[in-house]
Amino acid sequence: MSVIVAIDAGTTGVRAFALRDDGTAAGISYTEFTQHFPRPGWVEHDALEIWRAVQHTLSDLTSRLTEPIAAVGITDQRETVVAWDRRTGQPLHRAIVWQDRRTAERCDALSESGFGPLVRRTTGLVVDPYFSATKFEWLLTEGGVVTGPDLALGTIDSWILWNLTGGPNGGVHATEPSNASRTMLLDIRTLTWSAELSDHFSVPTAALPEVRPSSGRFGVTAAGTGLPTGLPVSGMAGDQQAALFGQACLEPGMTKNTYGTGSFVLMNVGTTCPEPAEGLLTTVAWTLADGTSAYALEGAIFSAGSAVQWLRDALGIIDKPQDIEALAASVPDSGGCYIVPAFTGLGSPWWDPHARGTIMGITRGTNRAHLARAVLQAISLQTRDVVRAMSEASGYPITALKADGGAAANNLLLQLQADDLQVAVSRPVIQETTAMGSAYLAGLAEGVWDSPADISANWKLDATFTPTVPARPNTEATAAWQRAIDRSRGGNF
């Protein structure tokens, strides 16, 4: 039996994960890396530290594997951007992370100038600093990065692929549509870089990676990567699209939510690119080796697990993330307290980069348990708002939700989610669905699996949470949540 090794380069750390062809886990390794906050609203990573974390996790994982490796997959944090010198392999600036809001004013100016409809029509996105284009533009205008024949620009998948396949010694500079569709530079219907958008942001297309199918051979591993040389690197996808694939959401209408640093709801909407939907993103889910593509609607919630980290790191209310469940369960509700964790603005369905976190409804009786419950409540309510918008836009009523990500281990959160959505919420046995998705894409390309149907057969249920309370569409609690959202937005706090 062989394994597929997946590299999952997330926002706070790197996982290396080995998946057997029967869908069981063969091993995992994890390394955190540093978060840099040079100014309020700015978030950066050291791209070399990320690459060293990749090497370390791969070395650690492969030292414990007994099965041969058939292929390698890559999944990543998507909109984060890197600029590097192809000749030396050195980054030219710290990576600018998807959470970074330094280009908010630039995005405001673009929207006010009427630029939004072109972006929406071409890319399926909205004009927001979340996406890569204004980050690339900032690097080239404010960040000291100089254009030239040796300049490489890319998202984290491209940076890892390039290093994995040789770096300055023949590294492959490529990406695939699910990541490229998050840059605000890709025409999501033709799956090619838009010359009009690239010119507008002064991003040289020669510096951008080649766009290839998500499932297909990109290159082979080089020496010094933490892996044996000559292994095919054959699958890549952005983390949320990879989770959609790993959750076997392969038919239109199937929906998943990944509860990670942020929370990301994706619905498979089939092989035809839909028209833009208010408050939601249209994105490429994946492209297979035969050229068939799938599209998805996405609701991007910027803060989920990061709100739990805030309780731990900033307030000291919990010692570790796992503590929040018992603490929140010690009270029957949040006591009228509502938290909107808009630490880096609000994503879907509001898209307000100027929103900031708010806490409403505190009384003398509010305690740490109420705050913990309010955070879980906020994660669930944000997801409910996105799912409602998604069902209305797609015409597919959501009858079930598949859950994954670190916070999906929290039973109370998933029960709250089932109650708020009034649908069953299912959690798979293996939570590493992001890594699994890139592994499946790689394995399909190399013949480990014959078809996507094999992936559906491998999906295994851990637990299902069903609604325990009746629907509550117009309660005071719903109105209070909306007031809290309104207070957080655009300087109203």
Image: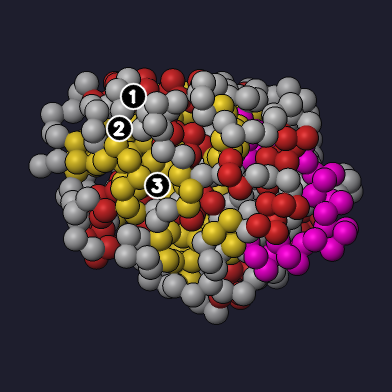
| Position of residue 132 measured from the top left corner of the image (x, y, whole percent) | 65, 45
User: Splitting the image into 4 quarters, where does residue 452 fall?
Assistant: bottom left
Please name the residue that numbered disc 1 is placed on: 225
Give me the disc on residue 236.
3
Q: Is residue 160 left or right of residue 22?
A: right
Tag 2–tag 1 contact (CB < 8 Å): yes
Q: Is residue 444 magenta?
A: no
- Per the rendered image, the range of residues in magenta is 95-123
Q: Is residue 82 visible?
A: no
Position of 195 with respect to 224 (left or right) is right
Q: Which residue is mark 2?
A: 221
Quadrant assignment for the N terminus = top left
Front-most of 436 and 184? 184
- Dot 3, crowdedness within 10 Å: few (<14), some or many (≥20)? many
Q: Residue at x 63, y 25 (%)?
A: 92
Amino acid under label 1? Answer: Thr
Tell which residue pokes out farthest to the bottom in this image. Answer: 395
Q: How far is disc 2 from disc 3 in space, using C-alphas?
A: 14 Å
Find numbered disc 3 in the image and state the secondary structure of the residue it sits on: strand
Residue that appears at 38% across and 68% down: 292
